[in-house]
Amino acid sequence: MELNESLFLIKLKRFKTNPNILFVLGFFYTKNFHENV
């Protein structure tokens, strides 16, 4: 789980220049996380 969070943080840093993409990635990341669990 820590590894997934680290990869997610890296993605956030990459798309930090675009808040809209960051929001969408966060939304789908959370959605997929709950579905997988």
Image: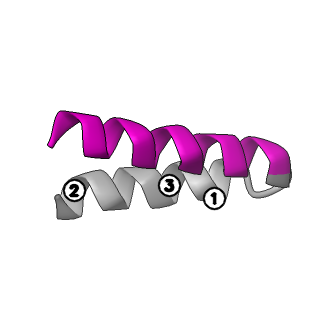
Q: Is residue 14 magenta?
A: no
Going from N to C along the chain, the mark reached first, 3 or 2, is 2
SS category of the residue bearing label 2: helix
Q: Position of residue 22 (x, y in %)?
A: 70, 50
Name the residue rendered at 42%, 49% in the picture.
30
Specify the amino acid type for callout 3: Ile
Q: Amino acid at mark 1?
A: Lys
Measured along the vertical axis of the image, is residue 31 above or below residue 3? Answer: above
SS at badge 1 = helix
Quadrant location, the C terminus: top left
Q: Residues within 10 Å of mark 1 (few under 14, many from 20)?
A: few
Q: Nearer the viewer, residue 35 or 11?
A: 35
Q: Relative to residue 5, is residue 20 drawn left or right?
A: right
Residue in the picture at 17% in, 58% down = 1
Q: Is residue 14 left or right of residue 26?
A: right
The circle drawn on residue 3 is 2
Q: Is residue 28 magenta?
A: yes
Q: Which residues are magenta?
A: 20-37
Query: Which mark is drawn over residue 10?
Result: 3
Q: Amino acid at mark 2?
A: Leu
Q: Secondary structure at mark 3?
A: helix
Disc 1 designates what residue? 13
Residues tagged 3 and 1 counted as in contact (Cβ below 8 A): yes
Residue appearing at x 28%, y 45% in the figure: 34
> Circle 3: is it few (<14), some (14-19), or many (20+) Cα within 10 Å?
few
Residue 32 placement (x, y as % from top left)? 36, 35
In terms of sequence position, does the residue under pointer 1 or pointer 2 come before the other? 2
